Amino acid sequence: MERSLFYIFVSLAASIIIGCYEIWWLFFLLLTGILLVLAFTSYSRPALYTIVILFTGVLLAGFSSDDIPENLPAEESFIVEGKIANYPQNEEGRGKFTIDTNCKNHYLSRIQVFTAFNSDVQKGDRIALKGSLKPPDPPGNPGQFNYPAYLKHEHIFYTLSVKEPEDIKILQPAQGMNKIVNSFRDQGISIVNTALPPQEAPILLGMLLGKVDSIDDEQYDNFQKTGIIHIFSVSGLHVGFVVLLCSWLSALFNLSKRNKFLFNVITIVLYGTLTGWPVSVVRASIMAVTCLTAYYFGRENQMLNSLGMAGIIILLFDPQALFKISFQLSFLATFGLVYIFPVLRTYFNQHHVFWDLILIPVSAQLAVLPLIAWYFNLFSPVSLISNIIVTYTAGASVILGIFTLILAPFLPGLATIISYPAGLFIEIIIHSNVLFKNLPLAYLWVATPKAMMIIAYYGGLVLLFYGLKENIDRKCFYTGLSMVLVFMVILCLPASVYNRGTTEFVFIDVGQGDSILMKTPEGKFILVDGGGSDFYDVASTRLMPYLHHRGIREVYMAINTHPDTDHLSGVVKTIKELRVVNIGLPQTISSVQEYKPLKELAAQKKSNVIELNQGQTIKVEKNFIIKVLHPEIGEGQRSDYNQESLALLIESMGI
């Protein structure tokens, strides 16, 4: 059957979801329906298969899923031995990696390690560590990244913080294949870092190996806003370029059909090993090998079946992979390419390469649009343009970069020369991305869509393309189209349209410091302070995720009560990220040095700076008034900014 494996994959995934979330009413409803089909129809064999898949998925979920226990004990001085399970990352004098331990306690079998220094260890090293052990902190605000849930899907329940280099001892360096691959990888990274400028090398390494720890945070955010962040998620795109490179080399050296097959498979396995086998690479590699096998034996390759086979294999070995962002985006984007793209191509009856360049990114974006909104609160219309240019430019960089990696251990001089044109393509990507980001309506921050909205969108998408492909009753097509368009309209609505007529006061968890978000009855947002820290980026990890979760694009006024870091940093970040109409500062200390960057940014973003003092009244709207109670005008500057801090009285709707 043409799509049997894909249907099995979808059924297995649904069964795992039912088991993990314990949706037993749905389980028994499906089971009852299948039994009725089995008893009263001629579809006995498919019904039996479906029952087997249903029970298999539920059992897999039961064996693989662990609830995060409450009150897991912490330990300040915890000593453990383990083997490094992934490629360590170092960024700005800090490191992180994962270790597999021999602890009998299930919750300690795998630990996420953070170091307060660049860790000089390798994947496969057996090490002993001493540090502070604790479970990861849960999110404090809606929209904040749920780190405990993320680690849970990686079968991790604890983090270990190591302060000093001497608290890590290498008991046994990496051996065998790990040692060879580490050396191969390190030499390639060294060549790229030496040959290319600091702004180009991290991007090329991110595209080649998924190594994003050295990419500038602002630059990374810009790639995300334009919808091309997927170039750093090593996936089918990259494996496809590996196959393309192998095919070209096979033709160049006139390899036989058998040797061409072996060369492709070996290269794919080598590349997957260099990247650490993220789930997207596993998916792409299975599909590529399936396609190559079909070609070798002269069989027709069904791409949707290949996608289904990849999903089944991954879920049988790791059911928790289903809940990883990379798994979901990878499979949905691929579904868009292998199902939606051919339907659109046939419908428009255009087979020119120009149309393919347009329809390919459109197909992928249609498939992943709700998940991008769910996880990142972004809708990027510009991605339809940016992907056309950047994806293929990135392909040239990846092919040249793979050449560099292959040649680095043997011909470092030639590898260096080949990396130069890769750097040129990186420059094109960087400048193109800046151009795309600055286009009007290039991207929108959108509120996190409801789960039922997402289900309705995908239901509409199925109806839409089923109607196109099967050419049946047009009602199916128009119903699906309407559901998709309604989703997009609701998604793009501004945050000000929600909860009209009510006043909101939200105290945002920013750790040290304070942050309050107010919403007026007419939908204007006012932010008072934004938190901050000298040790980590509070604004990016706590404040902005909440504002993005609400879909807030414009803040009517951002008020900073005083310029201490734990109150000011988040306000500055808000001005950078969103449109801020007015900025309120305490008049008596508005000229201090700490406010200089904020004022420069305000001038750049064309925000009004208002100096506030006792006696002023700001009428935001009819039913929302701000009265300034402190500081008194003319008090003069004090060394303690807290003494000059703003005190405000809010009057709204008679309160």
Image (spheres, grey):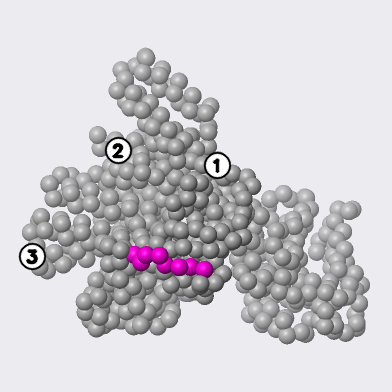
Q: Which residue is mark 3?
A: 254
**Looking at the rendering, which quadrant does residue 546 occupy?**
bottom right
Q: How far is mark 3 from mark 2, CA to CA?
A: 35 Å
**Residue at 83% across, 79% down:** 640
Q: Is residue 169 magenta?
A: yes
Magenta stretch, residue numbers: 167-174
Q: Indicate left or right for 304 with 623 as reference.
A: left
Task: Please give the count of numbered marks on the rendered protein.
Answer: 3
> 257 and 55: which one is in front?
55
The disc label shown at residue 5, or none: 2
The secondary structure that dominates the magenta segment is strand
Q: Earlier in the sequence, mark 2 or mark 1?
A: 2
Q: Earlier in the sequence, mark 3 or mark 1?
A: 1
Q: Where is residue 341 drawn, in percent x and y? A: 33, 51
Q: How far is mark 2 from mark 1, CA to CA?
A: 30 Å
**Looking at the rendering, which quadrant does residue 182 occupy?**
bottom left
Which amino acid type corresponds to the residue marked 2 in the rendered image? Answer: Leu
Asked if the residue at tag 2 contacts the one at tag 3, i.e. Cβ–Cβ closer than 8 Å, the answer is: no
